[in-house]
Amino acid sequence: MFNFKVLKQAMGELEENQVMDLLKEFVATSPSETEALEAIAACQAGISTVRDSFESGNYFLGDLIFASKLLTEAINILKPVLGSGEETASGTIVLGTVHGDLHDLGKTIFKSMSEAAGFKVIDLGIDIEVADFVAKSKELNPQVIGMSGVLTRAIDVMKETTEALKVEGITSNIIIGGNPLTKEVCEFVGADAFTINAVEGEKIYQGWI
Ligand code: B12
């Protein structure tokens, strides 16, 4: 029986070699998709402990950046078990960090998780202008548009972007993510949902599709 607690701990301690060894060992047991999702949840729980340690001053910025990369690597190892891939994509998500905001760690985590869940993610990058969100969404007609932002000023830009998308007649569901977001902010922005947690975000949009 695979020990998910050990995986979570190795992730939280940023033990890259141990995480990779554990995941390879896990994949070799031909786990079910449900078990693979449990492994992702364990990795994400480990990342949450990194975030807590960063906030309490026990980890540094470099650790946070490393943690985001490690999670992406871990998800890449699990992807074959999750049966994801472009041919089987369950839907398309247009994703980006809004104009004026250059933070991308959270967005990258959300992207990796969504890809692992079998979604095709068109990552526009960071500092994405309203017009670019609109143009790409018009072109691709995605099921979901995801906007990321952690700066306070990103909130107004998310609102502008949401309004522009609606004016252009784009009906895709909109989800916004980033640490400062709240229910009130979500209502102000006019998005369909918000989250401060990538796993929760994935559950929300799975409910739309
Ligand atoms: C890392 C970091 C940086 C790094 C960014 C590196 C990178 N590649 O992203 C660097 C050093 C470059 C940086 C720069 C700056 N930063 Co900075 N930064 C942070 C820090 C420490 C962590 C942010 C982070 O990555 N968190 C970890 C991720 C995993 O969390 P997250 O983004 O919330 O993502 C999770 C969820 O929200 C969700 N999610 C995220 N996006 C999405 C999207 C969707 C669609 C969904 C569904 C879910 C989802 O999933 C993720 C995983 O669960 C925060 C402080 C803090 N403790 O939060 C300050 C912070 C955000 N930064 C801040 C500031 C001020 C700046 C600078 C202006 C500093 C400066 N004077 O130059 C610049 C901004 C430049 C710009 N225009 O953007 C302030 C913002 C203040 C404010 N209220 O606006 C903060 C809060 C620090 C502070 N306390 O003052 N920063």
Image: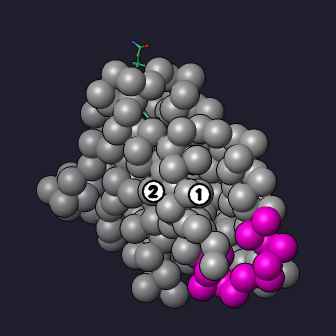
Camera sees residue 87 = yes
Quick check: 59 above or below 124? Answer: above
Q: Residues within 10 Å of mark 2 (few under 14, many from 20)?
A: some
Label 1, secondary structure: give it: helix
Provide the residue designation for mark 2. 45
| Mark number displayed over residue 7 | 1
Q: Is residue 184 left or right of residue 128?
A: left
Image point (64%, 58%), residue name:
112
Q: Position of residue 110 (x, y in %)?
A: 54, 56
Q: Earlier in the sequence, mark 2 or mark 1?
A: 1
Segment colored magenta: 25-37
How many labels were placed on the picture? 2
| Mark number displayed over residue 46 | none
Image point (68%, 66%), residue name:
115
**Disc 2/disc 1 C-alpha distance (Å):** 10 Å
Judging depth in this view, the residue of 142 and 33 nearest the camera is 33
Please name the amino acid that badge 2 sits on: Ala
Judged from this view, the residue extending furthest toward the left is 184
Image point (55%, 66%), residue name:
4
Quick check: 2 above or below 104? Answer: below
Question: Is residue 36 located in the magenta-colored stretch of the structure?
Answer: yes
